[in-house]
Image: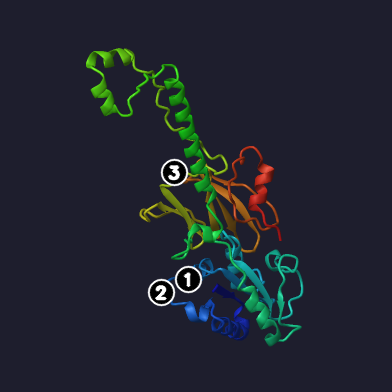
Amino acid sequence: MSTVFISYSSIDRIIAARLATDLQAAGHEVWFDQWNITGRDPYWNEIQGGIESATHFVFLISPEAIASDGGAIRELYHASGLKPVPVTVPVLVRATPGKWPILISPGMYQYHDLVNHSYDEMLPRIKNAVTVKAPLRADDSPASGVTPSSMGGVSRRTLNFAFVGVLVVLVIGFFVVKGLGGTAAPTVTPTSIAEAATATNTTQVSTQVPTTPPTLAPTVAPTTIQNTAVPQQPKGTKIVFSRNGDIWVMDRDGKNAHSLYANSNTDEAVPAWSRSGETIAFRSRSGSVNSEIFSVDSEGGKLTQLTRSSNRDTTPDYSDSLLNDEKRDRRHWRDRC
């Protein structure tokens, strides 16, 4: 079953609780703030954890939910910045005139209308929507007993290694055979080496064996073939992450965590390493839903603003041709409303 996060404005708590109860009764694991907030961690940290653990994100649409200063819209944008993005299920619970965020607009998703239809009529459709299979996350592993063949076949990485291995064996075999082909091997008529020893004296054997051993081709070391389809990542000794709206870096074992960039007037999130590991790009937002893309040296220091627009720029990612094609890369960063 799915893991469902319910995002809503506090004004719509009654309908949110009813939907959470019905989805839980249908067998889904439901993250509902009234059930899951423990108070052990900062409120927003627990909210983020719930969103990041969800396979489906149910957003209850109302005027307060899409307000730029509301908590629900912040949850929606956080979900949209994940990789992969949880399956979004918009549910209209109150009439909401005006322009909706593009992430839940009718042109992006089929929303479920509880304003012009009854709850009992729309509930089966919502249940069906949260059963749509979500994409496998990078840190997910197959369930116990699941074989690669049951998950859609052998991975491309495995095929690449198998192909390279066969190619290396063929190359080594070619050179070995070619080297041995220059000198004829002696003909031994007995059916076994033991019979040859008894049928021939030492002198006769010595005249049959060539004085110069066959020339062997030099050993060919396996050639490392770089898979150019996979971008080269930094060395992997550091991890960058967002904490309470600031950009932090720590060692891969979780030690030596420290703030790389902090601004009390803005909210920073979704950081991404450059392929060289020298810079980190991230989204920064101040006050409204509009945001820009910045980059900062991975050791701290120089800060560069990469986008300037009236749109909401988010989720930066470096491509292989970042230095050669700035226009194309901006499409990695922008999600216009």
Which residue position holds label 2? 40
Q: How many marks?
A: 3
Q: Are marks 1 and 2 in contact (CB under 8 Å)?
A: yes
First in residue order: circle 1 vs circle 2? 2
Q: Is residue 192 visible?
A: yes
Q: Hey, what amino acid is under mark 2?
A: Arg
First in residue order: circle 1 vs circle 3? 1
Q: Is residue 337 left or right of residue 269?
A: right
At a point 32% along the width and 15% down the height, the residue shown is 208
Between the C-alphas of marks 2 and 3, the distance is 34 Å
| Element marked by disc 2 | loop
Q: Nearer the viewer, residue 159 or 70?
A: 159
Residue 124 percent across, percent down from the top left: 66, 81
At a point 70% along the width and 66% down the height, the residue shown is 101
Query: What label does residue 46 carry, if any?
Result: 1
Which residue position holds label 3? 235
Residue 112 percent across, percent down from the top left: 70, 77
Depth check, mark 1 against mark 3: the one in front is 3
Q: Is residue 149 above or below residue 21?
A: above
Q: Is residue 230 left or right of residue 256?
A: right
Q: Is residue 25 above or below residue 321?
A: below
First in residue order: circle 2 vs circle 3? 2
At a point 73% along the width and 76% down the height, the residue shown is 96
| Element marked by disc 3 | loop
Dot 2 crowding, Cα within 10 Å, few <14, some 14–19, many 20+: few
Quadrant in which the C terminus is drawn: bottom right
Q: Hey, what amino acid is under mark 3?
A: Lys
Q: Hey, what amino acid is under mark 1?
A: Glu
